[in-house]
Amino acid sequence: MKMYDAVIVGAGPAGITAALYLARSGCSVLLFEQLTPGGQVLLTEKLENYPGYPSGIKGYELADLFAAHLEGLAVERPEGEVSSISGSAGDFTVKAEAGSDEYHARAVLVCSGARHRKLGLEKEETFVGHGVSYCALCDGNFYRGQTVAVAGGGNAALEESLYLANIAARVHLIHRRDEFRGLKVYQDRLAASDKVELHRSTIIEALEGEKELTGLSLKNVKTGAREHLPVSGLFIYVGFAPETAYLPEALARDAQGFIVTDTEMRTNVPGIFAAGDIRSKLCRQVITASGDGATAAQSAFVFLEQLNG
């Protein structure tokens, strides 16, 4: 039975950075990724706020550069989904693919990120791939020259509305509050666009259509007024839910389910560290995820040194 110094779950910016730091420190590292390395970066059309790229960089390009940084390092990278983590400091058991594979580690770094939250509307699941999407970069081109809607008020909703404005004939941005939470630079661009219509203080009450989305039923939460909005596509950006189903119940979480850590990325369970979007924090950006990963790796290294006595 091989014992790894560290098992890292998730190969987004946090996980890749943590693997890089630990491998360079001489630790044996196993890095899990269910899909392609890069995480949420792959769902971003272009990053304009990542230092070193003043003209911006495509999400997939940055993800490729992150993955390339691991080349030549002693990092094992099995594909698959982690199903459970058990054990205690110095002897954790990590099971993958519904328990068919089992790995052992002295420390675990949780970097599995978060998934898009859903509106919870009837037909939402049915219409996924038939008008409902959570990724404009992935599916936007299917709606070229058509009318689409975006639900949300944060950076992701604003960024993707601007992206879709280059593809769709018309974009309706729907937000349940009066004010958007996204950056002012994005708000200014949307306000200046003649292809984007803003629907403030408005919620989506129902998705219309039989086999595919044909429209939305909207309600103004201030006036109570209702309207029908014909659209071919709806892109939903109403926050994220952490990927924590595989984690021990003993791990402390906040009210939204994100993992609570200290400033050194240590959780309340000795030997388990968390970094990136899965962590309870204010800012969820590529650069903060990478910073978390570096800090978690250093904390894990110190922990491993202490185990050695």
Image: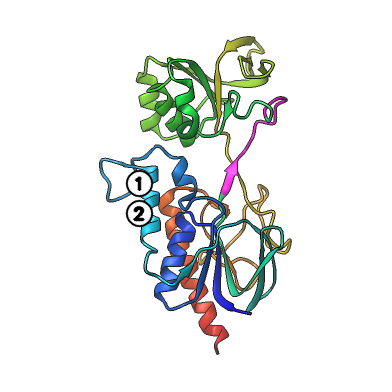
State the residue at coordinates (58%, 12%): 229
Point out residue 232 in the picture as x, y percentages from the top left corner. Answer: 55, 17
The answer to whether residue 41 is above or below residue 252 is above
Point out residue 117 in the picture as x, y percentages from the top left corner. Answer: 62, 38
Measured Cα–Cα span from mark 2 to mark 1? 6 Å
Point out residue 190 in the picture as x, y percentages from the top left corner. Answer: 40, 23
Q: Where is residue 177, by image quadrant?
A: top right
Q: Which residues are magenta?
A: 114-124
Q: Secondary structure at mark 2?
A: helix
State the residue position of label 1: 61
Q: For residue 268: magenta?
A: no
- Local crowd size for mark 2, using a 10 Å CA cut-off: few (<14), some (14–19), many (≥20): few
Q: Are marks 2 and 1 in contact (CB under 8 Å)?
A: yes
State the residue at coordinates (54%, 78%): 303
Would residue 89 be seen by someone viewing this image from the given angle?
Answer: no
State the residue at coordinates (60%, 24%): 130
Going by the numbered disc 2, the residue's amino acid type is: Leu
Instruction: Report the disc number at residue 13.
Output: none
Would residue 234 be seen by someone viewing this image from the given angle?
Answer: yes
Going by the numbered disc 1, the residue's amino acid type is: Glu
- In what quadrant of the picture does the N terminus appear? bottom right
Query: Relative to 26, is 91 on the left or the right?
Result: right
State the residue position of label 2: 65
